[in-house]
Amino acid sequence: MNRLWEDHRLSIIVAAVAIVGLLMSVYVVPEEEQAVVIRTGEPIRTVNTPGGQSDAGIYLRMPFVDRVVRVEKRLLDLEMSDEEVLSADQQRLLVNAYARFRITDPVRMVERAGSTDGVRSALEPILNSVLRQELGRRTFQSMLTAERGSALSNVTANLDRQARQYGAEVVDVKIMRTDLPDAPLQSAFRRMESDREREARAIRAEGGRDARIIRADADAEAARIYANAYGKDASFYDFYRAMQSYDTTFASENGTAESSIILSPDNEYLQQFRGRR
């Protein structure tokens, strides 16, 4: 072994240096990553970027000169912890949201943020700000309806516009939870309950007013019909009213106990009953 080393020392050293140099020169870019090659502080090449000319695979670089920055190609999450937001109806809301984004310009990302963690740090206050602005223009109740989707679309568009300067594209923004703080929750429920009761009283009052108007119109129409009938045939009108009076007085359903009415045969009340005037 010593003789081999003595005889081929130079060759072994050269081969070792070549292997080490080759290992330091080769780098592998998998499908889920993209890479930026930086030389003397300047980006000179990108690998496996969206719409780029090079795909994932094995590549060479200059050892000790080139530096490879690896960038995640898959979707990344940006989570926002519970933040208190003031809505348009002066409700203090606890909002928990998250955004999903991807790096579409790794060169700009390296120049502006340095890494994906740098992008997260830059986008987190922006997400907080655009959420406050958008929810501040809407009421708490509107966030429980389909209007919530419109608000999230605006937040996504505003956040994406800001993320472009860091080489990122925002795919969507979701609100996981929108709640009232525990302390004013009961007071908010009581206020909503009182509002509904006030609306119910107003509706009942309008219904009562409309009922009185309808009843008055009906009474007026009935009086008009009676007046027209009397004007056309006074005798028939007297007869009809007498029959109504008899029905009311003598009908069996007007009382459960049997009763008798004693009237003189010449009583004026019975003249229509006797069939003579």
Image: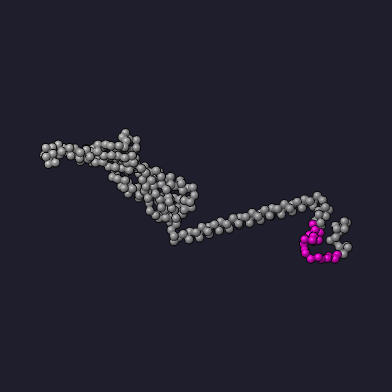
| Pick the front one: 179 or 221 | 179
Residue drawn where x is 20% and y is 40% of the image: 20
Determine whether 179 is above or below 55 in the image. Answer: below
Q: Quadrant of residue 13?
A: top left
Q: Is residue 90 visible?
A: no
Asked if residue 206 lies in the magenta stretch, the reply is no
Magenta stretch, residue numbers: 244-263
Is 219 left, or right, of 198 in this rendering? right
The location of residue 68, given as percent across then percent down, is: 26, 41
The location of residue 72, given as percent across then percent down, is: 33, 43
Determine whether 260 is above or below 61 in the image. Answer: below
Is 53 left, or right, of 224 in this rendering? left
Residue drawn where x is 34% and y is 37% of the image: 50
Asked if residue 259 lies in the magenta stretch, the reply is yes
Q: Quadrant of residue 266?
A: bottom right
Total label count?
A: 0
